[in-house]
Image: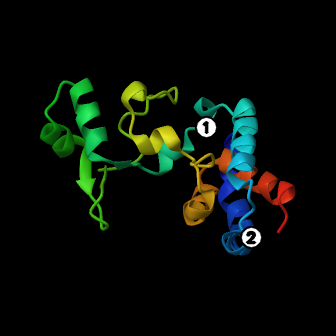
Amino acid sequence: MKQILNNLPKEAKDKHIENKKYFDKLKKKQPKNLDYVMQELHNAEFKKTDCLKCANCCKTTGPLFTLADIERISKHLRQKPQQFINQYLRIDEETDYVLQSVPCTFLDSDNTCFIYDVRPKACREFPHTDRKKFQQITDLTLKNVAICPAAFNIVEEMKKKMPL
């Protein structure tokens, strides 16, 4: 996994222009079965991918925290929402709540999450490759292929399965 993660930024950069062109075409000529195919590709990839061996998303990026996330997590931690915000979060340039720093504060040394059962929506949905109306999040997917080996593999399979 270490070698895959070391090579991923370069591989993603090498494929960036190709992927961007592919996604631009996808937005113009969206296949009718896109969401179904993406769900299939996502499920197939995550049958063979163990996120606990990687956790690169938790090590290199931080999720956005919605107000519902903050309420749920602070309750779980037996804190008031404002205490949770003060201790763990900051407001970014787009006025979203994000972690004060990465790697994620809640990531344990064995790549498990201290707050897994109440983790933010963004963490639960990452890398978003099975999201409905996938064509609306292609910019996010372009970023995620450089972070998540599974997302990289899904996009590569997508291009083979649905050539445009």
Question: Which residue corresponds to mark 2?
Answer: 22
Disc 2 packing (10 Å; few <14; some 14–19; many ≥20): some
Residue at 75% x, 62% y: name it.
31
In the rendered view of the protein, which quadrant contains the N terminus?
Answer: top right
Sequence-first disc among 1 and 2: 2
Q: Is residue 16 above or below residue 59?
A: below
- Alpha-carbon distance for marks 1 and 2? 27 Å
Place residue 141 in its image quadrant: bottom right
Foreground pick, 23 / 63: 23
Residue 62 place in picture, x, y as percent: 41, 49
Residue 121 place in picture, x, y as percent: 42, 41
Instruction: Find numbered disc 2 in the image and state the secondary structure of the residue it sits on.
Output: helix
In the rendered view of the protein, which quadrant contains the C terminus?
Answer: bottom right
Q: Residue furthest front?
A: 32
Residue 77 place in picture, x, y as percent: 24, 26
Residue 2, numbered label = none
Instruction: Find numbered disc 1 in the image and state the secondary structure of the residue it sits on.
Output: loop
Residue 149 visible to an observer of this rendering = no
Place residue 118 in its image quadrant: top left
Is 160 positioned to the left or the right of 44 in the image? right
Q: Amino acid at mark 2?
A: Tyr
Q: Is residue 53 above or below residue 4?
A: above
Disc 1 packing (10 Å; few <14; some 14–19; many ≥20): some
Question: Which residue corresponds to mark 1?
Answer: 54
Is 127 positioned to the left or the right of 69 in the image? right
Residue 6 place in picture, x, y as percent: 67, 51
Labels 1, 2: front one: 2
Foreground pick, 66 / 1: 66
Q: Amino acid at mark 1?
A: Cys
Residue 53 visible to an observer of this rendering = yes
